[in-house]
Amino acid sequence: MKGIVFTEFSEMVEQKFGLETLDNIITKSGASGSYTSIGTYPHSEMVNLVVALSEETSTPIGSLLEAFGSYLFSSFTRMYPQFFQDINDPFDFLENVENYIHSEVLKIYPRAQLPSIDAIRENEQSMRLVYKSDRRMSDLAVGLVKGCLKHFGEDADIEKVIDENSGAHVEFRIQMK
Amino acid sequence: MKEIELLKRQLERERAARREAEKILEEKSLELYQTNNLLLEVNASLEASVKERTQTIEESERKYRTLVESAGDIIYRVGANGKFTYVNPKAIQVSEFSKDELLEMSYLDLVSPKFRQKLSNYYRFQLKERIKSTYVEFQMVTKSGKELWIGQSVDLDEGGGAIEFIALARDITDRKKVERALLMNEEKYRSIIENMELGLLEVDREGIIIKAYPKFCKLTGFESHELEGRIAGEVLLDDEERRKMKKRNERRKEGEPGVYEVQIRRKDGSKIWVMISGAPYYNLNNQMAGSVGIHLDISDQKRTQKELVEAKDLAEESLRAREAFLATISHEIRTPMNAIIGMSELLATSHDNYTKEQTKYISTIRSSANSLLMLINDLLDFSKIKAGQLSLTPKPAILIDHLRHVIDLLDPKAEQKGLLLQLNTSLTNEIGHVLDPLRLEEILINLIGNAIKFTEKGKITLNVEILKDEDNTSTLHFEVVDSGVGIPDEEIELIFSDFKQSSNTSDLNAGGTGLGLSISQSLVRLMGGDLCVKSTVGVGSTFYFTLELKKTDDIKLAEDNPNAGKVPSLPGFNILVVEDNEINLTLVRTILEKWKCTISSAPNGLVATEKVQEEEFDLVLMDVRMPVMNGLEATRKIRSDGFTRLPIVALTANALETEVRKCRNAGMNDFLSKPFSQDSLYEKILPYYNSNSQETMESLVDLSGLRSMTSGDEAFTRRMIDLFIEEATKYNDQLRSAMKSGDTEQIRKIAHTLKSSIAHVAINRILDDVKEIELELTESECLNKTEKFSENLDLLIDELRTL
């Protein structure tokens, strides 16, 4: 898993729950806690960190991942403003994820294992989003979508339509309000 | 304190992260450096190989350039705008422009104005359709204004980005000249032939029409497209014509040219006759590719030819009719004449006690009848001469015998007038000559007869002088000299004319038709001489002619000729006389023994049938009315016993037509009425003596058919046989030429024509042959059969000639 996820996670935990909680979950989970955004770390380490945070804060993992997704999105807007130029609509952005953003990421990190995000626009107000990843972190994806909506100042109902393969294949319907 | 520990740990983690990041960066930068170095190396090697390639290209370009520069053909490049971008030295040499001038010019500037538009369109099309390569021929104009024919290949070159034309061109002016000369030559002959009203047709080996020329189309009424691609024979010919053509085409395939006539069916179904001159033509490999037929419309000629043939046939037919008529008339007149002569002879000797007056009457009847008979003979001869049908029958003969015969014949007449008739000649009976002795006698009898007629006192001499005696021929001069009244000069020219007699005759009863000299002259001419006369009025006349006669050693044959001597001789002729009347038998026996025949006799028919079984006879003379078994019955028995070819001649006193028929029906060959003269008996039995001597060979002749038609008139029969010989000889020649050309159609036509006349004179086997030929046999069978038949026909003709 890309280092940026770990560095941003660490920053969010420090920001939202304090340095002590961060230190606690690192110690508890047995993770190194030392991350650079250009490095690559085991996926299990992230899972352990999230589980430890859930126990520490008595918050469900899903909610935590969703919150992290929303945080991560705002970090992306800050760190990679070139992806957001000339895009004024969350659906336009989501449609670009697979073909534009992921392919740009692969240029810098050729070995990155990215989820597949297929965005199908059903009408002007509705979009189906197909998530496929062995990492089974669709909650993180929902958080990212919410961050996206928030970035463009939109509000929408996100309904999980399909959940198969223990979360390896999940489909959402995003209905604009 | 806890705070500090916490921060310390955090700091430691941050440091570790930084170091890790630095390490990653260092690794990345080393990786980058190494990749860069690798790239540099690759670059260097690339450069080297590019350089190498460039050198190779330059090298080959130099090679090509040298090639292009020294090429014997014009090579140039032209941009899409038509301007020259490259010209080789040959281009400069041919165009006469300098290189610099050319590079400023468009290729069209060099093209002759009459080709400019065409060429411009042509290459625009090539460019538009991206056609890789083209070839075109056109005329160019050089700087000095010379016009040259150019053959040019142009390739499109898209290799270097901008499209260019690469042209390879050659001066083909010489070739064009030759082509044009050839074309003009061909056109010249074609237009000559087309203007000659000759229809040209080109067909391939299979007979499929390749080209039908306008005149041929006009001839047949077809359009050329209706003919081309079709099989000539199927469109233009009938089945029959096609069959004929097939055979000719086989020969033409073998390369044999030929001219022949054929009937063509026009589009409207009408037929025209054309003469075709066909000749094969060959392809470049010298194999026969087909043939050209030149057709000339000969319908008009054919029509004329047909009309001429019809006219000729008609003329010949009427000539034949005339001949047949004359033959019939001759028969009709001679028969009663013979009766008159014979009866008056009988009358004269049948009684001893005639009064002087009665004897004179009988003698007058006889001499008048003889004159009349001579007159009729003259007329018949004359009409034959007029029809050009008088022909000679030369055979070996001893001339002196015939000269003596003439003298003996006329001596009594001369004596009557108190004239001396002499023969002067050095000829002996040891030399044989080939001539028609009877006709020569006729001439001399006529000349001497005239001499007697026109001479009152003195003598008449027949001089026959040998002018020249060579190994094979004798030249003889014949002269009849009289001491008569002579012929006035002004009449000399007239005496050989028809129906003319000298007026200078003291004998007003001289009589005659006036045809004698005319006939004699014709006969002498037929023998190769010319009858002339010299005369002095009051002194006498001399008629003379000269003949060149072939000599022959075949004196035996000449002696055998029964007509050669005065007394007939038939040695070895074995005759059975069937007669119940002793006196008659003795008479016949006396005559026949005088002729050296061997005689046996039978008193009635029954004995005759037995005798025939016991001995081989050449002839039976059969009385009709006899006791025990009559002649008719006996004849039927003899025939049914298998003696079908044994000649039986009836002797009967009953001269009625019905009796004659009865004899024929019974199977008798001929008929002689009693009482008969020696001459007529001789005449009756002679034919069987002649054919008797030939019996070693199978006879092809069977005259029973003809005889039944001519009712036994031998003279008439002879004429018919002569007619047949003449016609059959002609048809046999036609058969042979038809066999040579394999024209079975013509063979069948001739066979059909011959069939009916052959039935009259030939045995059934020959008749069967000719019938078979007429039937539809296969071609080869027909030809074989015809060959055999033709040989037999020759034998038949020969045999008929000797009868």
Image: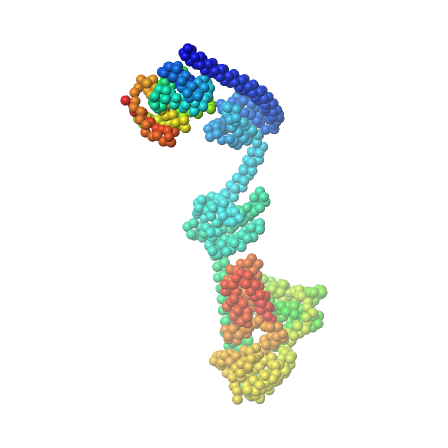
Q: Camera-side residue: B516 or B458?
A: B516
Residue occupying the point 54% across, 86% down: B605
Q: Residue B151, percent across and down?
A: 55, 31
Q: Is residue B189 visible?
A: yes
| Residue A117 relative to residue B432: left or right | left
Q: Camera-side residue: B70 or B587?
A: B70
Residue occupying the point 49% across, 66% down: B321
Q: Residue B35, percent across and down?
A: 54, 20
* Vertical relation: B45 (above or below) B598: above
Number of numbered discs: 0
| Residue B756 relative to residue B589: left or right | left
Q: Quadrant of the C terminus of chain B?
A: bottom right
Q: Residue B724, percent across and down?
A: 54, 67
Q: Residue B580, percent across and down?
A: 55, 88
Residue occupying the point 36% across, 22% down: A54
Q: Camera-side residue: B169 or B217?
A: B169
**Can you tell which quarter of the image residue B66 is in?**
top right
Q: Quadrant of the N terminus of chain B?
A: top left
| Residue at the front extreme of this rendering | B1
| Residue B3 relative to residue B538: left or right | left
| Residue at the left extreme of this rendering | A177
Instruction: Look at the image and name its color scheme.
Output: rainbow
| Residue B443 relative to residue B760: left or right | right
**Can you tell which quarter of the image residue B396 is in?**
bottom right
Residue occupying the point 52% across, 21% down: B105
* Vertical relation: B36 (above or below) B155: above
Q: Camera-side residue: B152 or B724?
A: B152
* Vertical relation: B253 (above or below) B64: below
Q: Is residue B459 visible?
A: no
